[in-house]
Amino acid sequence: MMTTILSGLSDGALYAVVGLLLTIPLVRTGDFNFAQPAYIVLGEYLLVSLDNHHWSIIPILIVLLALGGVLGGAQEVVLLRPTRGRDTALVTMLGLFIAIQGFVLAWWGPNPESASFFGGSSTIHILGGVLQPVDLWLIGIAVVAAAVLHYAVRRTRWGVLGRASMTDEVGAGLRGVNVPRLRTAAFVLAGALSAAVAVFIAPATGINSDNALTLVVFAFAAMAIGGTGSFGGTLLGGLAIGLVYSFAERYLTADWAQILPFVILCIVLVIRPTGIFGVRRLRLV
Amino acid sequence: MRRASLASSVGRLGRFGLAFPIAAAVIVALMPWLGLGLTIQRELQLAAIYALIVAGFNIGYGYGGQLALGQVAVFAGGAYVTAILYNHGVTELTIAIVASVAFAGLLGLITGLPGLRFADWSLALVAFFLVLLIPNITDLLSAQTGGVIGIPGIQGPTLFGQALSAKAFYVVTIVVSALVLLLYRNLVKSRYGNGLLVLRHGQALARSVGLSPYRLRLSAYLWSALPAGLAGAFYAYFSSYIQAGVFDFSLVTLMLAASALGGTRSIWAAPIACAILVVGPDQVAAFDKYSVLAYGVLLMVVGVGFAAGLAGVGDTALARFSGRLRPRSQAADVASDGAAGAGRSDSPDPLAIAGASLSTRGVSKAFGGVRALCEVDFDARQGEITAIIGANGAGKTTLLNAISGLIPLDSGEVRLGEEVISRLAADRIARAGVSRTFQTPQVPDTLSVLDVAASSRISRRRLPSVEVGLRSPRYWKVQRQDLLRARAALAFVGLEHDEQLPAVALPLGRRRILEVARSIAAEPAAVLFDEPAAGLDQEALESLAAVLRKLRDERATVVLIEHNVRFVMDVADTVYVMELGSVIASGPPEVVRRDEAVIASYLGHRHAAPEGPAAEVREPAKVGDGD
C-alpha cells in the first residue's frame, strides 16, 4: 500500500517536473513547446554516452544545461518567431519533436538504454514502503521547482516583466521591455533545465526514443488536470495522475493504468477547462 | 432539362483540369497489366490507402486550421471493425466499408469534441494520448481484437459476392480512393472549403457571415474522419494482419509528413506525396535510417515558410508556364459559368438589399463595473443612413457588437422588423439578415476577392456538404446564384474588375469596400458599418460615400459608426450621439450639430458652426477606439 503511494508520488513528480518545465514557456510566451520533452530524451542519450566515457556528474550537467539552453534559444529564434500567432507554429514544434526523435534513432539506434543514478540505487524504506533515491529526488525537485517558479513569477521583477509582456505585448514593448529577449530567455531556461533533468528522469524511466511522446502526453494531462499555466496546479495534477496510475496498476490492470488518466483528463477538460486547481485563467480557447 | 444539366456537369468537369488526375488514376489502376512488379503494386496500393487518411487530415488542418490528429486512431478503428467482421464470417467489402466508415464517423465526432472548446495544441495532445492508448484499448478488448497478437489471416474480400483477386482488389482500392479524393477536392474547392477558411480566419468573422463555428468544426471533424475509416477497411484486407503496434506515433509522423510534403491545402498532391514516402524508403536504403529525422526537418521547413508543399511548387510552375498568377479559387472554376448565368439572369438587378427597420429598446451592457451601454434606444429605418458618433469609449462599437450578437446583452431588446433578435446567437442574427463590417477589415488571406464577397452567401442557403462534394444540380444552381449576387455586389461597390485578385492584395481602402460588398452580397435586412472611413484618403472617402448613398437609394437600412464628423454630417440622415454608454442626442445632422450637450461633450464649438471652413474641421483623436 505504502509502496503504491510512494511509487505513485514519484511517477507523478516526474510528470509534474516535465509539466513545470513546459509551463515556463507557456506562461512567458503563450507557446506550448511540444518539442521540449524531446530535449529530455536527447539529454538522456547524451548522458549515457558521456557516462560511458566516465565523465563525472558535474561536467555532464554543465554540458546538458548548455546544450539544452542553446537548443531552446535556437528553437525560439529560428522556428517560433516566424510562426508565432499562425497556425503553423504547432506543426513546426511537432517537426522539431520528430526531428529530435529521428536524430536519436539515427545516432544511437532504436535499442533502449539504461542509466544509473548518480545518487546511488540503495532502496530506502519510508513508513513501510520502498523507493529508490532517484524517486525521492524527483519528488523533492518537483516540490521545490513548483514553489520557486510560483514565487518567481509572482514576486520577482523577472516575473512581472513576463506577465506584463503576456498581458500586453505592445504596451510592454513601448515601455521599454525587450519582449523578444524575454521570450528567448524563457526558452533558453526551459530548454537548459529540460536537458539537465534527464539525469533524474533517465534512471527512473529507462531510455527509449518513444518516451518523449509518453512524457509530453502525461505532462500535458498533469497540466490540464491541475490547471494549465499554474505551477502549483501542475504539481498537484502530476501527483494526482501518478497516484491514479499507480493504484490502477496495482488493483486493476496495466491497461487501465494508462487509460484512466486519459479518461480523467477528458472529464476535466469538458467539465472544468481551467483544471481542478486552476486559478489563473490561461485561456485554452 | 435534367440531361442538359448532366451534360453541362460533364462539360464543367473537363474545364477544371480534372483530366490529368483522372488519367493518372486510370493509368495507376491499370498498372498490373502494364508489367508492374508485385512489390511496387502493393506499395502503390498502400499509398492510395494512406492518401485517403491524408486527404481527411487536410480538411481538418489545411482548411479547418485545427491539428486533429485522431486520424490514426480512426484508421485503427476502421481496420479493426473490418477485421472483426471478417472473423465473424463477413467478407463482403461493401459491408466492411459501410461499417468501418460509420464507426469512423462516430470516433471522429467523439475525438473532435474537445476541439470545439480548446486551443489546437490541446486537441493535438488529446489525439496523441488516444493514439498512445490503442494497444491498451485493443488489449482490453482482446476477446474481439486478439489483444497483443492481433487478428491474422484476413484473406481475400468479396465484392457483391464475388471473390476479389489481389489484382482486382488493387484496382478497387485505386478507383475508390480516386473517387473519394475527387469528392474531397470538390468539397474543399467550394463554398464549404471557403467557409472553413473563413472560420480559420476567425470566429467573429465566421459568425458575422452567418456560419456557426460549432457546426462547421464538427462537420470538418466528421469529414476528416470518414476517409480514415475507409482506409482502415482497405488496410485490413491489404495487410491481412491487424495488430495494434502498427497504429502508432510513427504512422502519425508519416501522415503529417505526407500532408506537409504534398501541401496541406491540396487534395491531389496527397497520393503523390504518399507514394513518394511509401516507395521512396524502399528505393533508397539509407533513407530508412534517417526517415524520421527527414520527416521532422520537412515539417519544420513547411511550418516556417513553405506551407504550400508540392502543390505550391506545382502551382508556381504552372503560373510561370501560363504567364499569369491565378488565385486558387473555386470562383475561378465556375467563372465562365457564372458569366453565362449573369447573361440569362432572371432580373436585371439581382441584389435585393431593401432593408427592414432595426431598433433597440433599453439595451444595457456592463463590463465589470463599467457601464458600456446604458438603456440605449436606437432606431434605424430603411432607406436611411443612421450614424452613431461619440468619443472613444462612448459605447459605439459595443452597441454594434450587441446588435450583431457578438456580446450578450444584460437587458433590453433588439428588433429587426418585427422579429426580436437579441436572444439569438451571432450567426443566427447574421442569418436573420444583419450584416456587418469590421473596424479592421477581416479578409481571409487565402480567398479571392470574389470568394470573399460570396462568403456571406454560404449560410444564406445551406446545402448538405455531400451535395457540394457530389456537385449536384442543386449545388450548381445555388452556386450560380451566389456568384451572380457576389458579382452584383462587387459591381455595386466598383470592385468588379478585381474579382480574381487575392483579397489580401487589395489596399486598405479597397478591403473596406470589399467588406461592404461582402455584407450586401448576403442581401441583408440591415447593414452595420464599423468605422468604414477610418484611415481612408479623400478619394476613397468619396467612393465610400457614393456607395453608402447608393445603398440608401436602394432602400437599404444602413447603420454607420464613425469618427469622421464631416463625413457623417455629409452622408447621414439621422445622427445619434453617444457619451459614456448613453445616447445624449439624436436627430437630423443639422439639429444635432446645434445641440448644446453635443457641442459641450463632443463636437466643440468649431464643429458646431455649420458655415465654418470645411478644411478646418478635424476629426477627434481616435487611437485605440473600440477595444
Image: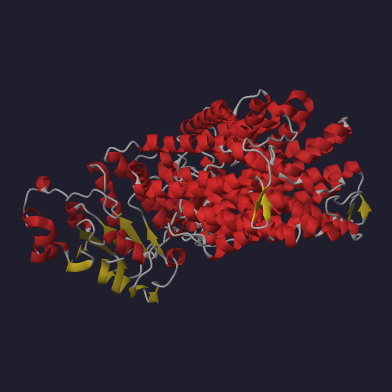
Q: Observer-nearest residue: B539 or A71?
A: A71
Q: Position of residue A23 (x, y in %)?
A: 49, 47
Q: Quadrant of the N terminus of chain A?
A: bottom right
Question: How many circles with numbers are drawn on the protein?
Answer: 0
- Residue shown at 88%/33% (left/top)? B38
With B287 as the anchor, is B431 left or right in this view?
left
- Residue shown at 62%/49% (left/top)? A217
With B81 as the anchor, is A281 left or right in this view?
left
Any part of residue B3 in sight: no
Indicate the quadrant where residue A260 lies. Answer: bottom right
Q: Observer-nearest residue: A248 or B44?
A: A248
Which of the colour schemes (rainbow, by chain, secondary structure, one colour) is used?
secondary structure
Indicate the quadrant where residue B105 lies. Answer: bottom right
- Residue shown at 22%/50% (left/top)? B622
Q: Position of residue A34 (x, y in %)?
A: 56, 42
Any part of residue B95 in sight: yes
Q: Observer-nearest residue: B524 or B103?
A: B103
Q: Is residue B28 above or below residue B142?
A: above
Q: Position of residue A62 (x, y in %)?
A: 53, 28
Q: Position of residue B217 (x, y in %)?
A: 56, 57
With A156 as the anchor, is B93 left or right in this view?
right
Indicate the quadrant where residue B82 lies. Answer: bottom right
